[in-house]
Amino acid sequence: MTSDFTPLPQLAEGDYVATLTQCFKAPPRFSRCNLNMDFDIPTGDFGSVRLRAYFQVKWIDDGTFKAGPKSRYFRTYQVCFGPADSDIFSIDSFPLGKYLVEVVSVERDALGEGLDPVNQYSKVGAIKGVAQND
């Protein structure tokens, strides 16, 4: 084993205020490139966990993509920022900052088989809106 191993992140399911730290075009998997969004979620006095949200989009180039009106990305964008005026977005259409996110547990693999608890992890299942400033 290597010394830079990081265990799979696990948080209790629920809503959290998280900080979007980056959006990027993921490397190809199964002939498609997802849009990945990384969020830092506070876990205590000074700690945080980084969780990811994944969106299937059609890339135009490395910084621009298309997401149709029935796509999860398009609907999420409208929840956060109101009606979209196009189905073409840039990688920075979601500005970095604080969002209300729903954390979900991944307990099954892609084939629907249950994962052993040691292999389960958390991810951002939904972005519910821009977090209100306190």
Image (tube, helix red, strand yellow):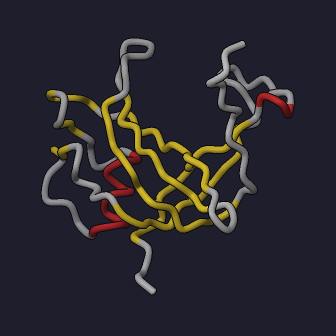
- Choose between 91 and 66: the one closer to the eye: 91
Residue 123 occupies quadrant: top right
Side (left or right) of 50 relative to 129: right
**Pick the front one: 57 or 95:** 95
Residue shown at 74% from the left, 30% from the top: 108
Instruction: Identify whether 22 is placed above or below 108.
Output: below
> Residue extending furthest front?
3
Instruction: Please state which of residues 76 and 7 is positioned toward the viewer in this rendering.
Output: 7
Residue name at image x 15 percent, y 27 percent: 61
* 116 relative to 22 in the view: left or right: right
Tell how many labels.
0
> x and y percent of residue 134 in the render?
45, 87
Q: Quadrant of the N terminus?
A: top right
Q: Quadrant of residue 6?
A: top right
Give the percent coordinates (x, y) of residue 128: 48, 65
- Tell me what residue is drawn at x 17 percent, y 35 percent: 63
| Residue in the picture at 37% in, 27% down | 26
Residue 93 at x, y percent in the picture:
22, 53
59 to the left or right of 19: left
